Image (cartoon, rainbow, N blue to C red):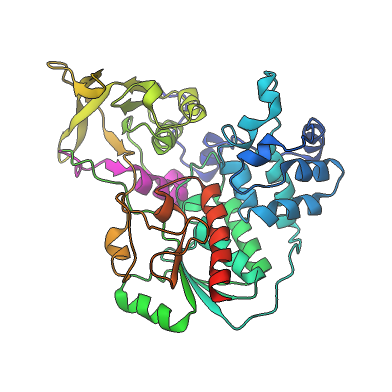
Amino acid sequence: MGEFKKPVSEEEFDKNFGQIKPLMNQTEAHLESSRCLFCYDAPCQTACPTSIDIPLFIRQINSGDLTGSAKTIYASNYFGNACGKVCPTEVLCEGACVYVEQNVKPIEIGRLQNYATDQAISENKKLFELAPENGKKVAIIGAGPAGISCACELRTLGYVVDIFESKEKPSGLTVYGVAPYKITNEEVLDEMAYLKEQFGYSVRYNEPINSKAGLEKLEQEYDAVFIGIGLGNTSSIQLAGENLENCFGATELIEELRMNHHKVEFGEKVIVLGGGNTAMDAASESAQMGAEKVILAYRRSKTDMGAYEFEYDLAKGVGVDGWFNVTPLKIVGNGKVEGVKFARTEVVDGKLVQISGSEFTEPCDMVIRATGQSKQVAWLNQIGGLQLDGGNRIVVDVKTFQTTNKRYFAAGDAVNGGMEVVNAAADGKQAARGIHDFLS
C-alpha cells in the first residue's frame, strides 16, 4: 500500500506535495544567516552559475537589509526567487559550502535566497533603474528562464522588448516542468509578474512563431531576435506499445500535473522508465498522487544514473522502488497498458548487453517514459544560416551567444541540450549583453 492517499481536492494535493524548501520566517533566516562565515573568495559563489555574491546577500539578511539582499541576488540572477527553490543547491552552492568538508550541515543558501526575494516580490520593491530607451527593438521567442532573463537585462540597457510565447503562462519549465513539491505555481507566477512590472517588457501569450513567414516578419520589425524555445516533447524510444493508453511522456505528464493538480489520474501501479532527474520527479509525483506501487526502472546500474543522488533519495523517501540493470523490451497490453516486458542487463567489455533468457514481464496499469526531450529541429531549420551541432543543439559563440545567423542569438536548453533553470537564466542574461554589443 502506498504512503499517500490519492488527493481529491486542492487542499489534499497541497498536503501531499508539501514544499521541500518551505519559506523561512524571520527568526529562522536570522539564525541561519548568522552561521555564515562570509568566506573570502567564497566557494559557494564560484559554484553558482549566475555568480551571485552569496556572502554579501547573507550578510545583508543578517543585518536586516532585506531590500539590499534582494537587489544583490537579482543583480546576478533574474530568477532569484525560483532558483532559491528549484536549483540543485545540494550540488551547487550548498554542495560547495566550507562546512561540508567539516561534516557540518551547509548553510541553507537556497532558502535564504528565497526568503530575501520573497519579501521584495510581496512588497513590490523597486530595485532597478532602467536606461532611457535607445530606439532599438528586440524580439524574444519563448518566455522561459533564458528569454525572460534576456528581456530583463535588455530593458536595463534601454531596448524595447517583445516576448512571443506559445503557451498561456510565462517561465517555461519553471511552471510547466518542475515537480510541484519544489515550487508552487503561485510562487513562480508571482515572480514573473514582479519582473514584468519591474522591467516593462511585453509578453504576447498563445502566440507561437511557428512559420518561416512569422520569423521573417520578426526580422523585418526588430533589430535582433533571441531564441529561447527550450526543448520539445519526450523523445520516443521506439518501443512497441508506446502508443497504448496510459503510457505517457514524463514532460507532458508533469505539465498536466502542474496545470491540473488533483484532477490528473494516475495508475495504481506505475512503472517509470529512465534514470535522470525527470524520472525521479515523475516517480515521486506518482507516489504522491496515490499510486500503490511505483517502480523506477533503469537499464544500467544505480551509479550510472544521470540523476543527482539527492533526487533519488527524495524518490525513495516517498516509497519508490528502484530497479537497476533492467531494460524494457516492450510495453504490453490490449489497447491500454497492462505491463512491461524487461530483460536483465550487464556490462561486458564496457558494453551494456542483455542477459540471454532473463526476460520477464512486470504487470502495471501506467507507464511513464522519462527518456529525455527531443530537439525542435524542424522549427530551427526554418532559419537560414542557423548551424546546429551533432546533437541538434544551436551553435553559438560562447561569449556573446550569437548564432551563425548574425541577427539571431540563443540560449537555454535549445543551446545546452537541457540543463537547470539557473543555467538558462545565466546564459539568457549573457546573451542580452551579446545583443547589446552587436547592436552598439
- Which segment is the magenta one? 240-264
Work out whether residue 359 or residue 20 is closer to the camera in this orientation and state it.
Answer: 359
Q: Quadrant of the N terminus?
A: top left
Q: Nearer the viewer, residue 186 or 425?
A: 425
**Residue at horizontal 84 percent and vertical 49 percent from the top:** 65
Q: Give how far across and how far down residue 276 sits, in percent.
A: 39, 34
| Location of residue 398 in the rendering, given as x and y in whole percent from the top left corner | 48, 55
Question: Is residue 292 in view from this perspective?
Answer: no
Residue 47 x %, y %: 61, 39
Q: Is residue 312 above or below residue 197?
A: above
- 335 drawn magenta: no
Position of 138 compared to 230: left or right? right
The residue under the point 57% across, 80% down is 136
Q: Say left or right for 340 vs 64.
A: left
Residue occupying the point 77% across, 49% down: 69
Which image quadrant is residue 220 in? bottom left
- Position above or below: 92 against 75: above
| In the image, residue 374 above or below residue 309 | below
The answer to which quarter of the image holds residue 46 is: top right
Q: Residue drawn 59% across and 36% down?
A: 92
Q: Is residue 176 left or right of residue 132?
A: left
Which part of the image, by quadrant, shows the C terminus? bottom right
